[in-house]
Structure formats: C-alpha cells, structure tokens
Image (cartoon, rainbow, N blue to C red):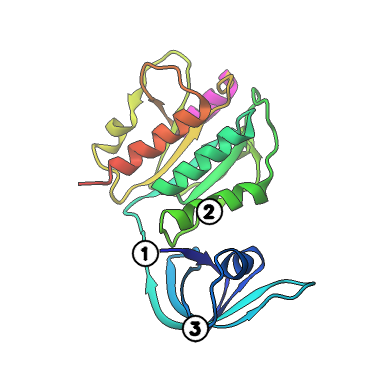
Amino acid sequence: MELFFSTEIGKERLTLRGKEAEHCAKVLRHKVGETLFVIDGRGGMYRCLISEITLPKKGEPAVECSIEERSFGVGERNYTLTMAVCPTKNMERFEWFVEKATEMGVERIIPIISEHSIRTTIKKERVEAVALSATKQSLKSYLPEIEECVSVEDFLHRDREKDTLALIAHCEEGEKKSIRSYLGGSSKGRNVLIMIGPEGDFSEKEIALALSKGYKPVTLGPSRLRVETAALSAVSEIYFASID
C-alpha cells in the first residue's frame, strides 16, 4: 500500500499538493479514477478516488480526490513517547534515528542543545520530511511532531504532565536503573519522556538540574553507544515493552 499525506481534507474531498501531488502523478503516474490512500498525520486514513490532476508548467501541482472511506486510529500506540535528543555532529546519523524512531513509534522528537553539543542547529524541514517518509513507509497515520531546537536548560524548565515518566540517560557514575525497571515491565498506558545527550555527554550541571526536576537516571547497558544508537535503543525498549 502506498500512502500519501494531506492537510487539506474536507467532508467529501481532499487535495494533494506540492511534492505529494508530484510524486503521485509524475513519479507513480497515477491517473484519474484510481484509488489512493491518504493520511492526515493525526490518526486519520482516507481511501479516495482521484477526480482531477493538475500539472502546470509553472505553479504548484495538485491532485483532487473524492473521499470514499474514512478510518481513524490506524497505527495507534498504547503509550506516548517523547524523545529529547541532542543532534549528532553528522546530521545523517540524527536523521537515521528520526527515521527508525518514527517506524517504531514516537509522538514527539525535540532536538536539545547541550553545553557539550557540537551541532547546535538542524534543518527542521528536512527532518520533518524524513519523519513523513518513515510514517508513510511504515503504514502509520500518526506523524511525529519535530520541534525547534532548544537548550537543555530551557527544556528542563518546561512544565510537563504530572503522570510523565521522565528519564535521562547519561554516563556519569551513580546508581541507575534500566528503562524496563522504571516501567515495571510494561509501557502500556504510560507517558514517557527520555533525554539522550550529545557525543560528549550532558554536563554535570545539566545532569544535576535534570535530577532536581524529577528526572530518573537510566542505564542503556554496559556498551558505549553512539548518540543515535542510544536514542533508538531507548525507543525500542518502550516499543517492545508495549507488546504482550
């Protein structure tokens, strides 16, 4: 099944525009009368029939569709996960994490900038495109939110929901538990937030601030992991802990 994405969805019709329309009509060569499946990124999936294709030499391409059937909650998870991760020096590694985390399931990815971060900016639109591609590839109807970069300190001063299990993975000495231990064996029904630091780890000041804000220190095992590996390991722990 090939999925497309649209934000222009009405009661009876929807429209694909820009790259989505171009991919549909020019790359895949779909024609009027053919069936498409479209997601809205918020849990909705729509079975549609193409009614009109517009491919101007100048201007934005568009594919108009009539909605035949609506489904909601496709790919819905029984947990909520937010990953606050420091972007990697090599941006391709961070994008790899975003792709794989989206395939498994994540509600929100927040690029956080540590005192030890080498990379301090990201191209948000590019990361969003990676997340959208992974969402469609994995046949999900929920598109993760990619936030703007924020400093670790400012992020830690944010309010969070009272029922959030807030975790921070770091390399400093001290007592730590596994993610599974904090979950009690299952992530079903849990609202989880996990912080992953940069190549040089969080600073002592940042770790102390996180702990003072109620974050619990976690271990991801004895191996020394790259940022993107550590982040995906954390996502997979939550993912597999939700499966019977």
Which residue is label 2 attached to?
133
User: Looking at the picture, does residue 176 appear above or below residue 19?
Assistant: above
**Alpha-carbon span between mark 2 and mark 1:** 16 Å
Q: Which element type, helix, strand or loop, lies under badge 2? A: helix
The amino acid marked with disc number 2 is Ser
Q: CA distance from mark 1 to mark 3?
A: 25 Å
Q: Residues within 10 Å of mark 3 (few under 14, many from 20)?
A: few
- Residue 241: percent from left, percent from top: 28, 41
Which of the two labelled residues, at mark 2 and mark 1, occupies the earlier sequence position?
1
Residue 45 visible here: yes
SS at circle 3: loop
- Is residue 205 one of those drawn in magenta? yes
Front-most of residues 124 and 135: 135
Please report the residue visible at 28 percent of the width from the left and 49 percent of the height from the top. Answer: 188
Q: Which residue is mark 1?
A: 74
* The disc label shown at residue 62, or none: none
Amino acid type for the residue under numbered disc 3 = Gly
**Range of residues picked out in magenta:** 204-214
Image quadrant assignment for residue 45: bottom left
Name the side, left or right, on which 82 lies relative to 64.
left
Tag 3 residue: 33
Label 1 Cα crowd, 10 Å radius (few <14 / some 14-19 / many 20+): some
